[in-house]
Amino acid sequence: MSQDERKTGTGRGFTGYAEDLLRVLARHPDRPAVLTADRGPLSAGGLSALTRRLARALRAGGIGPGRTVSLLTGNTPLALAARYAVPLTGARLVYLYDVMPPKALAHIVADVDTRLLLVDASRHTDLGPLLSLVDVPAVASLGPVPGHDDLLAPAALPSPHDPGGHTDPHEDWCIRHTSGTTGVPKAIQVTHGQYKRCLDSLHVDAGDPPRFLANTPLSHVAGLCADMALLRGGSVVLQPAFDAGATLAAIARDGVTHLWLLPPLLHQLLDHPSLSTTDVSGITRITYGGSPASAARLGRAAEVFGPVLHSWYGQSETLGLTEVRPEEHSRVGRHGQITVGRPMPGVELDIRDTNGLPLPAGGQGEIYARSPGMMRGYWKQPELTAQTVRDGWIRTGDVGYVDDDGYLFLVGRCNDLIKVPGGGVYPSEVEAVLLTHPAIAQCAVFGVRDEDAAEHIHAAVVPAADHRITPEELRAHVTTHLTPSYAPSTVHFVADIPRTAIGKPDKNQLRTLLTRRRPARKHTDEETATTPGTTDKTPTARLRRPDSTT
């Protein structure tokens, strides 16, 4: 196979990333590969053996190319092994996100033609509600789960043999789903070749060897970071969900070198009382992304952790697109927002106008992208695929511009424009300015229509610790940096911002929770947010999804 064939994922000699990972694990089988707080470390040899056993059991059950295995699993060693065992069989992998309601999960299970549903002990309570809504040809458990066959039980295992087989680079490795907050989740197909090219193109300096702490779902960026750590001879520390105190304890106890965090989670680390007594000197990289970040908070994080902050921008359809390195966080755009960086290796970006024509540097338009990990298309949605994939480019739906030095700045979403008198306002433009104020820890801006169908700008704001600010001060701050038309007509002070399944601010839920009891008005002096059904009227009343893990 030629070097070009290896890069493009073609040719008969192609091997999938799971097969590459098994070879890496075999080099030093006694080293620790997976660590958890409640059990001893799993060695590289142990993870390899567990993955191969699972792959053999899957093949014996009829799982192979063209089949779909859906995972109802958490952040457990067995779930990590399943992440590698399913690709070894050539089958496609689908994650069932733990923050989605049963109805949405049932839709996914049926839509992707699930042949086998795998559940582990951490998610078995979700199984009953799900199976009441959808029929699945086969259900099995990873480890003992009451009422279901254990895929790893000795009686279920065939005689030992190599479970590997030819992996077709053009077949689906995984079907990922968007959060679905605006309707039915979109199913995104990524092939074995595309994902391997993505992993090969990323060069993450996170310690030698790296030790990654996975405390957000393996279905998303944490899974990619875990893959990279293991492929580079490192290890993974698993936690069931993010908890600031547990994260700091793991950093000190397990020698963590790399974290992936959404900005709100980074803020929680900075606010935790144990931070001042925790040795964080072993951290060599904190990768963050997924939502806007406060420049003041990032500055504080750099003081605490050192020059280790890296920001990633990308989409489910493209995977990673751009990166901001530690020394680049001072690069700001027209309205003070931090750049989302320059293209990662192998990534091409283009800014185009409404006619699809390229714009010069500084021109604001839709971002088109080509990347090593870009999707094959949307599952069973050829028309939507044709709308999104144009001549090999992905239409991201994001609006932005590139400066003369090649740094990308985000402005908003094409379909997220708030139409106000005199023009349109992208929420991210207002968010970027709000986050420059030291009294604001988090924010989310969205549009609300009144009884006359006129649209108004609303802002949900989480005040920074020990800070107080009035709506008038916030509006003045926005007006000073932009114009009066960008100033929020209504400000909601909240204790938390609800998140979607992929960790982004859930503006649909904010809009529903914050406006369901009051009509949208032309302006307001102040609004306070309360959880529906409560009578708490303090400016920091908690607003949180009951099932949220963030």
Image: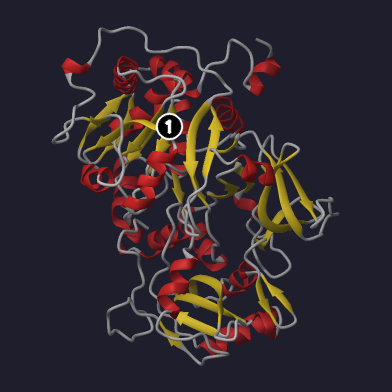
Q: Is residue 254 above or below residue 489?
A: above
Residue 496 is situated, as x and y percent measured from the top left of the image, at 39, 70
Residue 457 is situated, as x and y percent measured from the top left of the image, at 59, 79
Whether residue 153 sits left or right of residue 162 in the image: it is left
Q: Quadrant of the C terminus?
A: bottom left
Residue at image position (21%, 45%) is: 128
Density class for disc 1 (Cα within 10 Å; few <14, some 14-19, many ≥20) is many
Depth check: 292 or 84 in front? 84
Report the amino acid beneath label 1. Leu
| Residue highlighted by disc 1 | 93
Residue at image position (64%, 43%) is: 383
Residue at image position (45%, 32%) is: 227
Q: How many marks?
A: 1
Q: Is residue 286 above or below residue 410?
A: above
Residue at image position (55%, 72%) is: 445
Residue 391, picture quadrant: top right
Residue 279 is situated, as x and y percent measured from the top left of the image, at 36, 50
Q: Residue furthest bottom?
A: 525
Whether residue 61 sits left or right of residue 433 in the image: it is left
Q: Is residue 83 above or below residue 473?
A: above
Q: Is residue 145 visible?
A: yes
Residue 74 is situated, as x and y percent measured from the top left of the image, at 31, 42
Whether residue 1 sits left or right of residue 205 in the image: it is right
Depth check: 331 or 443 in front? 443
Name the element at disc 1.
Answer: strand
Residue 222, picture quadrant: top left
Q: Quadrant of the N terminus?
A: top right
Q: Is residue 215 visible?
A: no
